[in-house]
Amino acid sequence: MTFLPDLPIPVLAIVGLALVGLCVWRLVAERGRRIHWIRRALMAIVVIAMVARPGVPGGEVPTGSVNVNVFLVIDTSQSIAAEDWGQGEPRIQGIRDDVRDVAYAFAGSNISVITFDSEPELRVPLTDDGSAVIELVNALRPEIGFFSQGSSISAARDMLQQEIERADASDPGAPTIVFYMGDGEQTAEAPPQSFDTVAPLVDSGFVLGYGTEQGGRMQESTFDQPAEPVYVQDPAGGDAISRIDEGALQDIASQLGVSYLHRSADVDLAPSLESMTSQQGEVDLSQFEEARLDLYWVLAVPLFLLLTWELWVFASALRLRSGATRGRR
């Protein structure tokens, strides 16, 4: 495990010792309120641990010098959980593998990540930190089915156009490359919008398709991790099956003016990227930086629970005081 603290280590240590020391002092001084100060000490420890940014190694990505803006448009709808990638893995695993290849090929370039399901979301603004992009995509999960209201394959169109225009305004000379990654399955009632308004802003890219004609069942996304996998059910009975819609993906590729490529686990994406990177400039792949998976967000769960407990105790105390005041009147 490694740490990348957001504050200098001496400052973090002083602040941490001060907070925990205060809680310990009050714990000793207020014997009748020990549980409150134990809770606050735990909160202080969790916050300090989050600021220290613990993480684990996640491989390596090269540093490089290809000056382009790369936009990754990634489908995170429920269908991307369909288990027809490789040996029964979910499609999103294929996306993770390909994003790693893109980050490697365009090392040192600016990369942005936009996801879409029911709504589009800018996950990563343009950054030259390839390890952060890999880390983010490795942590992506399909949309929670409870919130799903159907997804459109063009849901990210307007956001993509806005982000490209913003990038062009700040760096007019940088080429724009777009990778659209999805399965083409349209579940929204309204027909998808055309990407032809984005095409004039795009210099190159790929529409990458994930899934098979036979399709696969989809493990349901939930808040918690069930002991046994739960699969999305077809209203007609049995497990629902998601199948790739290559026609829809080819339409998007045509609208954007880029090539369509069906992806499979036994074919690397890297060779298809070589000609693209050679057109933009040479990449120095001799130097590497360590990719890492940040774990600070895991600590947000106990911190949330401790804060909820603290607020509940505070609210209860207010109610008691209010009741006592009314009683004296």
Image: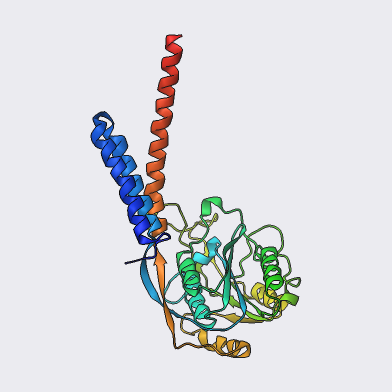
Q: Nearer the viewer, residue 269 or 27?
A: 27
Decide if residue 30 is in sight here: yes
Q: Position of residue 114 (x, y in %)?
A: 59, 66
Q: What residue sits 58% from the left and 83% below the top?
A: 66
Check the image and tell me how it is coloured.
Answer: rainbow
Q: Position of residue 92 (x, y in %)?
A: 49, 69
Which quadrant is home to the N terminus? bottom left
Question: For residue 35, what is the image quadrant?
Answer: top left
**From the viewer's perspective, is 52 left or right of 70?**
left
151 shown above or below 243: above
Q: Nearer the viewer, residue 216 or 273?
A: 273
Q: Nearer the viewer, residue 266 or 72?
A: 72
Q: Position of residue 270 (x, y in %)?
A: 51, 85
Q: Position of residue 43 (x, y in %)?
A: 35, 45
Q: What residue sits 48% from the left and 62% below the top?
A: 141
**From the viewer's perspective, is 54 left or right of 240?**
left
Question: For residue 29, what is the image quadrant?
Answer: top left
**From the viewer's perspective, is 107 left or right of 178?**
left
104 shown above or below 242: below
